[in-house]
Image (cartoon, rainbow, N blue to C red):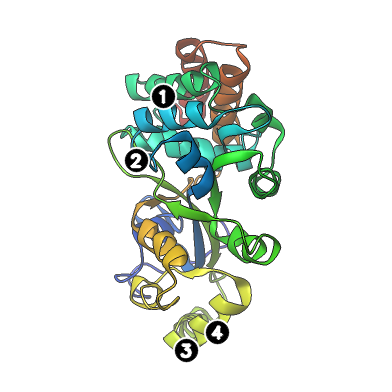
């Protein structure tokens, strides 16, 4: 990991969520301490779903049906940021992981299944192809403007939504799944520079991640604590944040690998090509897998 010190066994991460720990781990060695995290869930407009006569979807088939029924006029049933970059990959990976595939297995039957599901969402009109141009912020603004019935988005949007549309009836739920529950992980990590006063740096991190200090930092910076014992009581009885905290158990890390940007690009390109009709799921998956295999030296 270059400049970062190997701190395996020197900092206790046993109470931390798996995703944040994995984001600091390479080849079984720990190179960082999770600072604060965020994740993704399904946001939905309660009034739109009620008007369409559908329940909050929990499976891919239910999402396919609900999104199509909520699509009418200028309103699209579902979207998430689908940019051909890391922001898009952040969302796309929830489809891949839900099949049970890893980030490096898009060319498998499960990877093709994930791409096919997105293709179905586009083809039945439930998911707007315009999302290939939307950031997560753009997606939120489409939702609060009444142009989206459902979206996948993150913890950081909650304060803005509560301030800008206080009378809007919206709620959140786990992302509809195929085989397993999956969410994307965001956030920040601490690291110790190798060769310096590593012992003192680790002692500082123990202080910085202690409960009171951690809660102060999480509140000021809008994160969920990566330490499950702190996160579980962080937001009191707030039902919206509780869903996000619960999903931290299923939030996956992207990488870490030095070559991750190139792998991410292959993944987001595959989904973009399928969404726009430039490629079939099978061909897009094979192309992305060839790129990933070359990067991994397979």
| Mark 1 and mark 3: Cα distance apart in space | 46 Å
| Mark 3 and mark 2: Cα distance apart in space | 36 Å
Q: Considering the numbered disc 2 on the image, is that residue within a helix, a strand or a loop? A: loop
What percent of the width, then of the height, locates residue 154? Answer: 55, 54
What percent of the width, then of the height, locates residue 147? Answer: 66, 39
| Mark 4 and mark 2: Cα distance apart in space | 34 Å
Foreground: disc 4 or disc 2: 2
Residue in the foreground of this view, choosing between 44 and 135: 44
Residue in the foreground of this view, choosing between 100 and 40: 40
Q: Considering the numbered disc 1 on the image, is that residue within a helix, a strand or a loop? A: loop
What percent of the width, then of the height, locates residue 232? Answer: 36, 73
Q: Which mark is residue 15?
A: none
The crowd level at tag 1 (other Cα within 10 Å; few <14, some 14-19, many 20+) is few
Q: Are marks 3 and 4 in contact (CB under 8 Å)?
A: yes
Q: Considering the numbered disc 4 on the image, is that residue within a helix, a strand or a loop? A: helix
Residue at label 4?
A: 216
Q: Up-down: is 73 above or below 188?
A: above
What percent of the width, then of the height, locates residue 225? Answer: 46, 71
Q: Which mark is residue 212?
A: 3
For image coordinates 45% across by 59% down, the residue present is 24
Q: Which mark is residue 298?
A: 1
Mark with earlier residue (1, 2):
2
Q: Are marks 4 and 2 in contact (CB under 8 Å)?
A: no
| Mark 4 and mark 1: Cα distance apart in space | 45 Å
Q: Which mark is residue 58?
A: 2
The crowd level at tag 2 (other Cα within 10 Å; few <14, some 14-19, many 20+) is some
Q: Residue 259, located in which quarter of the rendered image? A: top right
């Amino acid at each position: 990991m270059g400049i970062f010190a190997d701190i395996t066994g020197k900092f206790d991460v046993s109470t931390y969520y798996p995703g944040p720990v994995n984001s600091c781990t390479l080849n079984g060695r720990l190179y960082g301490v999770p600072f604060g995290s965020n994740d993704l869930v399904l946001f939905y407009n309660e009034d739109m779903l009620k008007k369409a006569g559908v329940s909050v979807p929990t499976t891919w088939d239910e999402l396919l049906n609900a999104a199509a029924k909520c699509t009418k006029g200028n309103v699209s049933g579902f979207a998430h940021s689908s940019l051909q970059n890391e922001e898009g990959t952040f969302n796309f990976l929830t489809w891949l992981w839900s099949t049970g595939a890893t980030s490096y297995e898009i060319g498998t039957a499960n990877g093709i299944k994930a791409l096919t599901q997105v293709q179905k969402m586009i083809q039945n009109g439930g998911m707007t192809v315009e999302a290939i141009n939307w950031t997560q912020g753009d997606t939120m603004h489409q939702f609060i403007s009444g142009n989206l019935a459902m979206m996948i988005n993150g913890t950081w949007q909650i304060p803005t939504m509560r301030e800008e549309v206080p009378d809007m009836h919206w709620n959140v739920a786990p992302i509809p799944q195929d085989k397993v529950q999956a969410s994307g992980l965001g956030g920040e990590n601490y690291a110790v520079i190798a060769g310096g006063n590593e012992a003192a740096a680790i002692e500082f991190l123990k202080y910085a991640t202690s409960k009171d200090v951690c809660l102060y930092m999480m509140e000021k910076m809008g994160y969920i604590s990566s330490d499950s014992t702190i996160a579980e009581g962080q937001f009191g009885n707030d039902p919206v944040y509780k869903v996000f905290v619960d999903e931290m158990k299923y939030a996956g890390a992207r990488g870490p690998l030095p070559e991750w940007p190139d792998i991410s690009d292959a993944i987001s390109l595959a989904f973009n090509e399928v969404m726009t009709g430039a490629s079939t799921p099978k061909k897009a998956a094979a192309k992305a897998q060839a790129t990933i295999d070359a990067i991994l030296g397979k």
